[in-house]
Image (cartoon, rainbow, N blue to C red):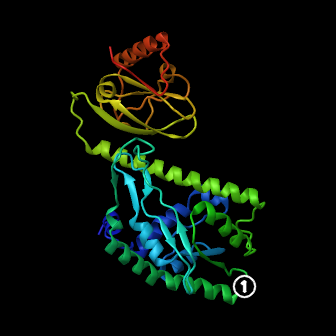
Amino acid sequence: MQVKERIAAGRLLDDETVFSLVAARLGGDDVSAAGGAVLDGFPRSVTQVQMLERVSRAALVVNLGMRPEALVTKLLGRAACARCGASYNTAEVDLPAETGKPAVFLRSLPMPEGGCRVCGCKDLTRRADDAEAVVHRRLAEHDAQCAGVANHYRNKAAAGGPNAPKVVDFEITKGIPETLPLLLKEVEATDTGVGQSAGADAAAAAVEAARAAEKKTAAETRAAETQQLQQSQPQPQDQVDGHMYCSFPCEGCGEHLSEIISKQAYYHGVVWVQCANCSTRKLIADNKGWFSDRPINLNDIAGPGSRILPTGNVEISSEEQARIAETVSEFMRRKQVPSKRKQVPSK
């Protein structure tokens, strides 16, 4: 069964597949330069632990827990914008404390009444592997595998020695902004040298980093799903007019731009977009296909820092370059700087 199919069915990946992916990433130059890495969700089995210990050593092990009923509720509440993939969660958890169980309060993150905060779409979709039966199966497999992992590291910690890991068991009862400072405090108290901070300022910075990471993840999800949607659609020579959704990063501030533009302008002309966050402008030109990350060296036409994105191996001829330059020059002469985006028809 392929990786995507196993995940959609709620099955965990086999040890060899997972370790090959992790080992390849740990071999990166950036990991060596940083002196280590944080592994999230790995290892999940004793076999994976043994594989990891052949190539690396865990200095700190953090075992995160949550009341099962809260975890299932939040997993079933996960949703995404049907158009751009922005993340939402329709479930709010408010569980009182019970014998041996802490109170849990987790806020929902619903789509605004006016539609998606990114693109305005009002439709939500849910992951295939977030069906209740699949969630329970996935959690059962996780618990069965990870119990051995936790015991392995606890036994190594109890045995002591210079290579013994420190183990932190942490129960999640609130959202990331409230939880992260408490988790950092627990990590710092282990005296491993991992996660040492300057106090409140570091905790606040970590909260902001967590929020930024959530935002980046949502942007990457939007970009990946948009690219998949674009590549799956036909690319006829003559497109009827209509609109298409495009998602790409701003080169000024890194914010992910999401624009709905005219198909005619995209296929047969040029499109100016302007980042609403930092006002950096960008020219997109392509009369042959979809976006790609390969730039054509036309910065003298589009201006410093701008890129013109063609599809795959498409090359823009000198005649096409001249047509684009003429269109852009006319646009600049009119000084029609858009507040958000500007579409300029081809000559």
Q: Which quadrant would residue 313 be assigned to in this image?
A: top left
Q: Residue at x 61, y 74 (%)?
A: 62
Identified by mark 1, the residue type is Gly
Q: Which quadrant would residue 102 be assigned to in this image?
A: bottom right
Q: x, y (%) of residue 309?
A: 41, 32
Q: Is residue 273 above or below residue 141?
A: above
| Camera sees residue 290 | no
Secondary structure at badge 1 equals loop
| Camera sees residue 2 | yes
Q: x, y (%) of residue 256?
A: 49, 41
Q: x, y (%) of residue 223?
A: 42, 46
Q: Which quadrant would residue 133 be assigned to in this image?
A: bottom left
Q: Is residue 344 above or below residue 12?
A: above
Q: In this view of the protein, which residue sits in the foreground, 94 or 69? A: 94
Left or right of 122? Residue 100 is right
Left or right of 11? Residue 331 is right
Q: Is residue 85 above or below residue 42?
A: above
Residue beneath label 1, please?
Answer: 161
